[in-house]
Image (tube, rainbow, N blue to C red):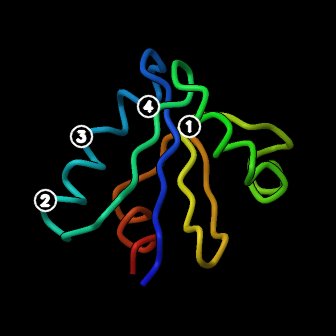
């Protein structure tokens, strides 16, 4: 089973836009997503940095939020995405 992680920032406007879709994914698809706030939680930020090589390669050379990571397959995407892409991510 894959381990899905969402790295986000509390005040991030892009993250706020994505949260209803993440909630829908959890409610409708039964997804288990480990949601990690990284702007105010250093432990979560350290976890995100531990994946920096994988994330930077897929996110324009930066660590940014929101970042969606499948920790088993190293599939990553960043920013605002459509709900269909979220469904494919957990499939």
Q: Position of residue 60 (x, y in %)?
A: 81, 44
Q: Position of residue 7 (x, y in %)?
A: 52, 42
Looking at the rendered image, the disc whose residue lies closer to the viewer, 1 or 3, is 1
Where is the C terminus found, in terms of image quarters?
A: bottom left
Looking at the rendered image, the disc whose residue lies closer to the viewer, 2 or 3, is 2
**Neighbourhood count class around disc 3 (C-alpha, 10 Å): few under 14, some 14–19, many 20 upward:** few
Report, in whole angstroms, how far the alpha carbon at label 1 lies from the one at label 3. 21 Å
Q: Is residue 88 above or below residue 53?
A: below
Report, in whole angstroms, how far the alpha carbon at label 2 lies from the one at label 3. 10 Å
Considering only order in the chain, which callout, 3 or 2, is on the residue closer to the N terminus? 3
Residue 15 is labelled as 4
Report the side of 19 relative to 28 (left or right): right
**Mark 2 = which residue?**
27
Image point (80%, 37%), residue name: 62
Q: Secondary structure at mark 2?
A: helix
Marks 4 and 1 close (CB-CB < 8 Å): no
**Mark 3 = which residue?**
20
Q: How many marks?
A: 4
């Amino acid at each position: 089973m894959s381990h899905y992680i969402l790295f986000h920032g509390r005040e991030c406007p892009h993250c706020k836009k994505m949260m209803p879709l993440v909630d829908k994914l959890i409610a409708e698809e039964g997804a288990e997503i480990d949601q990690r706030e990284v702007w105010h939680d250093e432990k979560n930020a350290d976890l995100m940095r531990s994946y920096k090589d994988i994330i930077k390669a897929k996110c324009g050379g930066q660590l940014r939020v929101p970042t969606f990571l499948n920790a088993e397959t190293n599939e990553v995407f960043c920013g605002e995405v459509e709900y269909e892409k979220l469904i494919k991510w957990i499939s």
